[in-house]
């Protein structure tokens, strides 16, 4: 249970000295309780209080970075089991495989595609994160060449070197070791050599074991060897075992019971004969890095969108992209209904409009996710915003009339909107459920 | 310029062509009911133009009228512009009527520690043997009378300029007025003869809607007069937002003047009733919300209604009566209560002072409900506060037949669960004209008990009873048949009204629970709930819990502190020690911004159910509802 | 910060779908859904039942996604044959029949609804979910017709909402069916609706929560967490939420990514878009997921087979 503001307040010196920047200890306590404060700003904390308050600020899962430069990514540094408790911070990295059995050309083509494959949706740039190079050949030399082929095609792409043989790893690291690739994977048998390589090149290291007890042991050994940045591959034998294993690791990590599990999880999605399922489970249930085969375009889009959804901050009001949304196939005389970009408002109105079966446009203006009522009250929804939105989405060229239907709750703005935009404003109903009837009775273009 | 004549009463006013009837009404001194501030949306300022040229966009603003009414000249005063001389009938219902305003024995207990004194002095005139200056003579006499040490009293130039004449004309018998002001003692007045009994102070509650003034003798602290009246700013808009918007458009000055005039009006009434000269009022203590006090002090409140909602000042303020236009002694000190934030004003600090929260171990939940609500939870060690918009429903606004607590308003209702026949009481026992907030709460609770509405407030239209029917837009319950009423219409409560009421009460309850969560306390740990303001005085406490307006606590733990704002102002007026701690109280109250508190939306949704989604928080109501449900199954 | 272990005090109640001859119906299979006493996939095969995949058909394809009409061809004009294909070809666990004809303005042919339900029940042996009208004015007639036509078959009738639940509840109570309780992506509203149903006499073992599922990329992030929260609260002991969930990201096939996909991969896009919302819904706790593209049914069945710890045919309720 997170500490309540008052519990924290009781631990504070109650001097109201303002040195933390807050006017009183109580307001400082409120900030700490909401996770927005920095406990070290209080100079008068006693040791006991430091222990209680300090403990909850250090992330229970180590942040591990892979790669260098612009495309470098960091994973881990998570705090919760469910995203609704706070949020998930560091999106799962998707690494696309190449094999050292492929020709150098095949490797180059794949690498180039990964480097260039990215989609833009809802304002975010969705990309694949890097390349997983697999030592399928068993030959260190072939592996070294494959890694070199990736390197010469796209030096900046983060990499996972997937080889169980330390000799192969060494061959790969020879060409890319200084770009901080992820080494996959040390086992009970190979860890001394793998740890040596990880330390030599300063690379993060995945450790792999068939069960959690062994994984725990291995983790402690690697830490003892001096490798600080680890990832855990639970190598479940089936997807049925993945969720329990990954959940247990996350639980043990966040309650800080066993610090050896306080590392990000790695999942090789190619091993279960159903890559879509493995990717989805990995994204949902705590995998920080997933290695996959080439993704068909549909899977690519859907998987990256799922990742975006899961790693969206659930505390933020859900917002729609502002814009002009057609309902049905609206013509030039179709009504235009303006509303806010709070997504529930959007979905509700959209639903009723669709069932009303009147082709029309929804003009969604950016109120930062506030509902109509709060947006009007706070002034976020105003005539200037409406004017700018009409212009920005070029509503005037989609329809020939100049009439705008606004939500019932926005009626106080009707006059000002008319003045500012020159559009005739019709005040719609307050309840979206009445929109069908409203359009049927009121709308004449 | 066109002349507008208002009937009945033939009051006249001129406005420029194109001016609104509302403007004319305000010039003519008519207090029109303008809930929305003249935006044409509340539909309350209905008038009928009998003759003359005027224009009114009935398509846009005429929704409240039938075509016949439009044809016979009905329009909204705020939207109808005049094109020549017109005669206008103003129905009674469009005027603000005398309202039940909360004035009562305050029952405050505090030490008498005034900060102003009068000393009647009989001075020995100067002689050649005793040639000390007038001032020395005066100050020594004050000290001898038990007043402050002579050297510590500062005498301003104006008093010195008048002193030689006053002393000599009075034959060296004068009354000196000394006040304790920031920085020390100050000789603020010198009068001929013995006026030492004529020392008064005013405690003012500067509300958005009403002004209440208590006059007290500062010789013994006793109340000598009380008066109240509407805040005359209402003609610039009913709620605080429309006032600020009005100020943005027309400047702050008219609002500042109206605030001062409203206070003056109440002070004059109280003073006249007590046969007191207003010039003998030497101190005015004002508690009001942050926007009201900003306006009174002539400080621009515009930035408080926009993000990031910043007031200009939070600490207490002092000035003189003359500088803000108060018609009291021109040097009278004006003391303005400090605020916690833009939304938690001096009125709430005064509430806290009067309910004793800041001095007790016991945990108090203080709730002040109006269109906006404020909630403070705490004790002497910690206090959390928050504020929000409850919407006007609980005060009768945005409810079809809602009205303020005016004569004819239904204020108490009970409903026979078997026949669904209501019995009600109205204010002044007049025929009903509408329903007040307390009446609405009763109806909601009673309809729930009778299983007419479900816990979202939806009316079960399958019940066969002629009082349950479907109106033009919504299902409704008939509270009074038109024959019983003064308005010739059935008075009903619609499902939409109920929805608005539930949204309002959910804001309040959600806010209470959010603060309880911040503090980590349960309802059992609340030692008392204090209702502040008029609202708490009239409502039925059991019904307030039944609908989940406040958390369930034993009824005996709920009390009304009445007008806590004016009570707090009274305490500060007569006890200067309390005045000193106000800034500290205000500073120690932590403000929880509900909009930034992600759990509030959840708590709001949970509270938007009767009485709450989790009946575990309302164990008594749960038991009661079970019984009601059983009963309704037995007698369907 | 988070619950450390799985010391749950609550358990999801079970709901039976479909009645076989033994129970007075004509379904060749009936299912139990719910019964979980842990988070999804954590309690082993003793916690709850295998998630089910429902295929959704309609009685008026004019309002159905073009991509399904193209893929299924003439079948879409004949709900009975379509349901048969769903059972035999697509591999659905159960059928959801959406009575889209009721959405037409001025709809009044209530008798036709009863006939359609009857025909579909005749054509398939799978349990049936019915999605009725969404207009309170005709709810009563619609649910009465469907309820009666499916009497004894333990249908699942949808959709009850906070503003209109009495008609569907009355039909379910009168003819022995279950009810889908839909609320707009909010745990508290879901709970409130269950309370409303309970308070008018619908036992919660007849209720399935539909928390409303936004399409992937279009509100799904919110639906996912609401499902997780509902499951979590139920396990923590909130009795009003201890009912199984159904998830239908019904907008999936209307969204831009699918509509504007290149023809060659449009079906694949449709399947993936449904799959990547339905599978997470299952992981969040949905007992039934509903899809519209035939290809998605198989993809989901395969996935569940990989994930489900027990025998995949294990939750038929006959004799249980």
Image (spheres, rainbow, N blue to C red):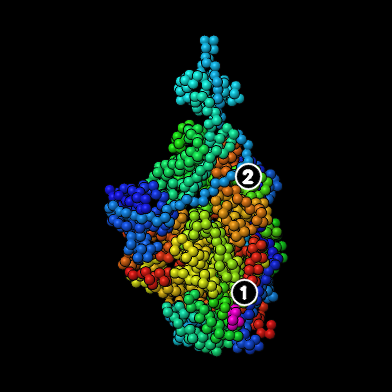
Question: Which residue is the extreme one toward the top?
Answer: B129
Kindly indicate the quadrant of the structure image that contains residue B87.
bottom left
Along the viewing direction, whichever of C55 and B544 lies nearer the viewer: B544
Which residue in the structure is indicated by mark 2?
A: B356
Quadrant where the C terminus of chain C lies? bottom right
Along the viewing direction, whichever of A68 and C214 lies nearer the viewer: C214
Percent across and percent down for residue B435 are 50, 59
B178 in relation to B494, above or below: above
Quadrant where the N terminus of chain C lies? bottom right
- Magenta segment range? C172-178
C137 in relation to B134, above or below: below
Sequence-first disc among 1 and 2: 2
**C177 magenta-colored:** yes
Along the viewing direction, whichever of A320 and A403 lies nearer the viewer: A403
Q: Which of label 1 and label 2 is nearer to you?
A: 1
Determine the secondary structure under disc 1: loop
**B385 magenta-colored:** no
Along the viewing direction, whichever of A162 and B317 lies nearer the viewer: B317
Q: Residue at x 68, y 85 (%)?
A: C319
Task: Identify the subunit bearing mark 1.
Answer: B
Task: Identify the subunit bearing mark 2.
Answer: B
Q: Circles 1 and 2: CB distance less than 8 Å?
A: no
Q: How many marks?
A: 2
**What number is the disc on residue B635?**
1
In the rendered image, is residue A362 in sight? yes
Q: Residues within 10 Å of mark 1 (few under 14, many from 20)?
A: few
Q: Residue at x 57, y 43 (%)?
A: B567
Q: Residues within 10 Å of mark 2 (few under 14, many from 20)?
A: some
């Amino acid at each position: 249970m997170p500490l309540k503001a008052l519990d924290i307040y009781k631990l504070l010196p109650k001097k109201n000295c303002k040195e933390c920047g807050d006017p009183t200890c109580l307001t400082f306590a409120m900030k700490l309780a909401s996770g927005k404060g920095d406990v070290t700003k209080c100079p008068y904390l006693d040791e006991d209080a430091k222990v209680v308050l300090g403990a909850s600020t250090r992330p229970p899962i180590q942040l591990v970075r892979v790669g260098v430069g612009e495309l470098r990514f960091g994973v881990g540094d998570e705090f919760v089991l469910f995203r609704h408790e706070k949020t998930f911070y560091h999106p799962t990295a998707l690494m696309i495989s190449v094999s050292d059995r492929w020709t150098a050309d095949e490797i180059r083509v794949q690498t180039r595609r990964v480097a260039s494959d990215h989609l833009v949706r809802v304002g975010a740039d969705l990309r694949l994160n890097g390349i997983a190079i697999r030592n399928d050949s068993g030959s260190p030399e072939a592996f070294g060449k494959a890694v070199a082929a990736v390197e010469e095609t796209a030096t900046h792409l983060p990499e996972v070197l997937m080889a169980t043989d330390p000799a192969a790893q060494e061959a790969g690291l020879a060409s890319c070791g200084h770009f901080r690739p992820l080494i996959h994977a040390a086992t009970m048998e190979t860890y001394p050599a793998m740890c040596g390589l990880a330390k030599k090149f300063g690379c993060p290291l995945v450790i792999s074991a068939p069960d959690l007890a062994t994984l725990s042991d291995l983790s402690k050994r690697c830490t003892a060897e001096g490798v600080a940045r680890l990832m855990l591959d639970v190598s479940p034998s089936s997807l049925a075992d993945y969720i329990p294993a990954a959940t247990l690791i996350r639980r043990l990590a966040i309650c800080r019971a066993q610090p050896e599990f306080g590392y990000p999880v790695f999942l090789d999605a190619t091993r279960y004969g159903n890559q879509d399922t493995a990717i989805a489970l990995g994204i949902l249930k705590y995998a920080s890095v997933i290695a996959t085969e080439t993704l068909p375009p549909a899977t690519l889009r859907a998987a990256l969108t799922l990742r975006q959804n899961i790693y969206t901050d659930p505390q933020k009001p859900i917002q729609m992209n502002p814009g002009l949304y057609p309902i049905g196939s609206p013509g030039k005389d179709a009504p235009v209904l303006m509303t806010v970009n709070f997504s529930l408002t959007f979905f509700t109105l959209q639903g009723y409009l669709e069932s009303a079966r009147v082709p029309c446009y929804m003009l969604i203006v950016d109120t930062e996710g506030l509902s109509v009522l709060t947006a009007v009250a706070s002034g976020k929804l105003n005539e200037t915003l409406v004017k700018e939105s009409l212009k920005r989405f070029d509503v005037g060229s989609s329809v020939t009339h100049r009439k705008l239907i606004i939500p019932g709750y926005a009626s106080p703005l009707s006059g000002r909107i008319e003045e500012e935009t020159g559009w005739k404003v019709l005040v719609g109903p307050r309840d979206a459920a009445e929109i069908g009837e409203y359009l049927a009775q009121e709308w004449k273009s | 310029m066109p002349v507008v004549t208002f009937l009945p009463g033939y009051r006249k006013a001129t406005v420029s062509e194109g001016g609104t009837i509302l403007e004319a009404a305000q010039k003519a001194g008519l207090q029109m009911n303008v809930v929305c501030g003249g935006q044409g949306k509340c539909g309350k300022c209905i008038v009928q133009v009998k003759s003359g040229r005027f224009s009114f966009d009935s398509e846009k603003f005429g929704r409240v009228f039938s075509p016949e009414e439009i044809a016979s000249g009905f329009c909204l005063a705020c939207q109808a512009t005049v094109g020549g001389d017109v005669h206008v009938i103003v129905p009674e219902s469009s005027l603000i009527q005398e309202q039940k305003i909360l004035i009562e024995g305050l029952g405050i207990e505090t030490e008498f520690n005034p900060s102003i004194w009068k000393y009647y002095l009989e001075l020995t005139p100067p002689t050649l043997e005793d040639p000390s200056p007038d001032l020395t003579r005066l100050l020594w006499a004050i000290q001898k009378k038990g007043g402050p040490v002579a050297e510590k009293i500062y005498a301003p130039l104006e008093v010195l300029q008048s002193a030689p004449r006053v002393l000599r004309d009075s034959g060296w018998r004068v009354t000196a007025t000394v006040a304790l002001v920031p920085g020390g003692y100050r000789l603020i007045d010198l009068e001929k003869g013995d006026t030492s009994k004529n020392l008064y102070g005013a405690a003012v509650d500067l509300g958005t809607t009403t002004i209440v003034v208590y006059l007290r003798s500062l010789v013994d602290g006793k109340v000598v007069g009380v008066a109240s009246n509407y805040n005359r700013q209402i003609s610039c808009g009913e709620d605080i937002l429309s006032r600020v918007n009005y100020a943005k458009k027309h400047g702050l000055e008219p609002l500042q003047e109206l605030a001062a005039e409203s206070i003056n009006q109440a002070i004059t009434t109280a003073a006249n009733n007590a046969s007191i000269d207003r010039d003998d009022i030497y101190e005015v203590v004002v508690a009001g919300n942050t926007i009201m006090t900003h306006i009174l002090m002539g400080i621009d409140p515009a930035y408080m209604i926009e993000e990031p909602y910043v007031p200009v000042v939070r600490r207490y303020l002092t000035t003189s009566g003359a500088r803000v236009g108060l018609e009291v002694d021109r040097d009278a000190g004006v003391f303005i209560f400090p605020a916690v934030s833009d939304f938690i004003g001096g009125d709430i600090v005064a509430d806290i002072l009067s309910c004793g929260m800041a001095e007790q171990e016991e945990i108090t939940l203080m709730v002040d409900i109006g269109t906006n609500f404020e909630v403070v939870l705490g004790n002497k060690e910690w206090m959390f506060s928050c504020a929000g918009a409850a919407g006007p429903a609980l005060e009768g606004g945005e409810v079809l037949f809602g009205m303020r607590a005016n004569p004819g308003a239904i204020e108490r209702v009970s409903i026979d669960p078997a026949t669904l026949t209501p019995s009600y009481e109205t204010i002044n026992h007049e025929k009903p004209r509408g329903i007040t907030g307390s009446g609405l709460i009763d109806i909601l609770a009673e309809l729930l008990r009778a299983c007419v509405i479900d816990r979202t407030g939806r009316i079960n239209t399958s019940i066969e009873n002629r009082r349950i029917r479907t109106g033009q837009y919504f299902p409704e319950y008939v509270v009074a048949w038109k024959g019983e009423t003064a308005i010739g219409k059935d008075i009903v409560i619609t499902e939409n009204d109920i929805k608005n009421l539930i949204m309002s009460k959910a804001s309040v309850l959600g806010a209470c629970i959010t603060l309880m969560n911040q503090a980590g306390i349960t309802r059992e740990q609340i030692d008392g709930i204090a209702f502040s303001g008029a609202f708490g005085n009239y409502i039925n406490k059991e019904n307030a819990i039944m609908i989940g307006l406040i958390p369930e606590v034993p009824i005996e733990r709920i009390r009304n502190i009445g007008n806590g704002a004016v009570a707090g102002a009274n305490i500060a007026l007569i006890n200067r020690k309390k005045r000193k701690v106000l800034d500290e109280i205000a500073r120690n109250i932590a403000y929880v911004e509900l909009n930034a508190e992600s759990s509030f939306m959840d708590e709001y949704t949970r509270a938007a159910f009767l009485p709450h989604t989790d009946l575990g928080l309302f164990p008594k109501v749960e038991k009661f509802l079970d019984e009601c449900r059983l009963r309704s199954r037995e007698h369907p | 910060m988070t619950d450390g272990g799985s010391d749950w005090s609550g358990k999801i109640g079970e709901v039976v779908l479909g009645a076989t001859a033994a129970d007075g119906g004509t379904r060749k299979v009936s299912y139990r859904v719910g019964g979980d006493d842990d988070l999804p996939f954590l309690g082993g095969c003793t916690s709850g039942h295998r998630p089910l995949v429902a295929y959704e058909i309609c009685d008026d394809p004019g309002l159905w996604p073009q991509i399904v009409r193209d893929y299924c061809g003439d079948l879409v004009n004949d709900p009975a044959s379509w349901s048969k294909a769903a059972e035999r070809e697509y591999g659905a666990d159960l059928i959801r029949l959406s009575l889209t004809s009721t959405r037409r303005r001025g709809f009044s042919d209530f008798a036709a609804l009863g006939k359609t339900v009857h025909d579909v029940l005749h054509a398939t042996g799978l349990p049936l979910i019915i999605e009725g009208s969404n207009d309170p004015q005709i709810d009563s007639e619609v649910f009465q017709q469907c309820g009666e036509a499916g009497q004894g078959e333990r249908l699942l009738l949808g959709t009850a909402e906070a503003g209109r639940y009495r008609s569907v509840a009355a039909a379910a109570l009168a003819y022995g069916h279950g009810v889908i309780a839909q609320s707009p992506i909010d745990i508290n509203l879901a709970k409130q609706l269950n309370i409303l149903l309970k308070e008018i006499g619908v036992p919660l073992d007849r209720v399935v929560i539909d928390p409303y599922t936004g399409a992937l990329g279009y509100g799904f992030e919110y639906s996912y967490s609401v499902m997780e929260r509902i499951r979590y609260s139920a396990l923590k002991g909130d009795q009003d939420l201890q009912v199984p969930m159904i998830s239908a990201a019904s907008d999936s096939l209307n969204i831009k990514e699918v509509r504007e996909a290149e023809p060659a991969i449009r079906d694949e896009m449709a399947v993936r878009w449904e799959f990547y919302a339905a599978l997470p819904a299952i992981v969040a706790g949905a007992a039934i997921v509903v899809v519209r593209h035939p290809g998605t049914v198989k993809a989901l069945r395969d996935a569940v087979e990989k994930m489900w710890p027990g025998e995949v045919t294990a939750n038929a309720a006959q004799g249980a």
